[in-house]
């Protein structure tokens, strides 16, 4: 699981030791932005679309692929259809979503190709 900035920063080394990466987007967002996602007083600052979050995911994807490993997402962002093309451009190999999102996501991927 890639869920912390530390894991992203050493992801090239980690990729040499594992079969694949799964990015925990909820935790990665929380730790990247240093915002407790369960604290309602801070929810204004919890922005899963923040450029820093995307930079972390992109870096992990590049490092996984550099070592011949695949990378997927786990968490709310995979089901965000406004990000599907972004994830495809980053080289994310798998998007984990709830069953009800499979068909809309599949359509979005087909439309993007």
Image (cartoon, grey):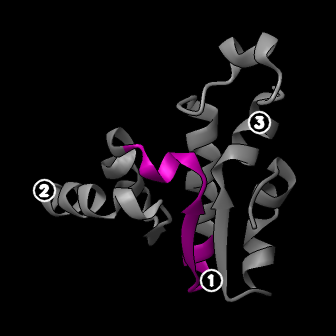
Start-end of magenta stretch: 64-80
Which quadrant holds residue 106?
Answer: bottom left
Label 1 SS? loop
According to the image, label 2 marks what residue? 111
Residue at the far front: name it: 100
Question: Closer to the camera: disc 1 or disc 2?
Answer: 2
Between marks 3 and 2, how big is the CA–CA gap? 31 Å
Q: Position of residue 21 (x, y in %)?
A: 66, 73
Residue at image position (80%, 10%) is 41
Q: Position of residue 2 (x, y in %)?
A: 74, 62
- In this view, the residue in front, 40 or 21, is 40
Residue marked by disc 1: 67
The residues bearing labels 1 and 2 have C-alpha atoms spaced at a distance of: 29 Å
* Front tag of 1 and 3: 3
Percent of width and height locating residue 98: 47, 60
Identity of the residue drawn at 75% across and 67% down: 1
Q: N-terminal of the two: label 1 or label 3?
A: 3
The answer to whether residue 78 is left or right of residue 100 is right
Q: Which residue is mark 3?
A: 30
């Amino acid at each position: 699981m890639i869920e912390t900035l530390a894991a992203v920063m050493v992801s090239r080394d980690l990729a040499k030791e594992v079969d694949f990466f799964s990015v925990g987007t909820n935790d990665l967002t929380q730790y990247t932005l240093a915002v407790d996602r369960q604290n309602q007083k801070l929810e204004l600052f919890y922005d899963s679309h923040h450029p820093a979050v995307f930079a972390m995911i992109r870096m992990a994807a590049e490092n996984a692929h550099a070592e011949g490993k695949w990378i997927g997402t786990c968490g709310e962002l995979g089901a965000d259809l406004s990000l599907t093309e972004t994830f495809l451009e980053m080289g994310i190999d798998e998007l984990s979503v709830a069953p009800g999102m499979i068909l809309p996501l599949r359509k979005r991927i087909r439309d993007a190709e």
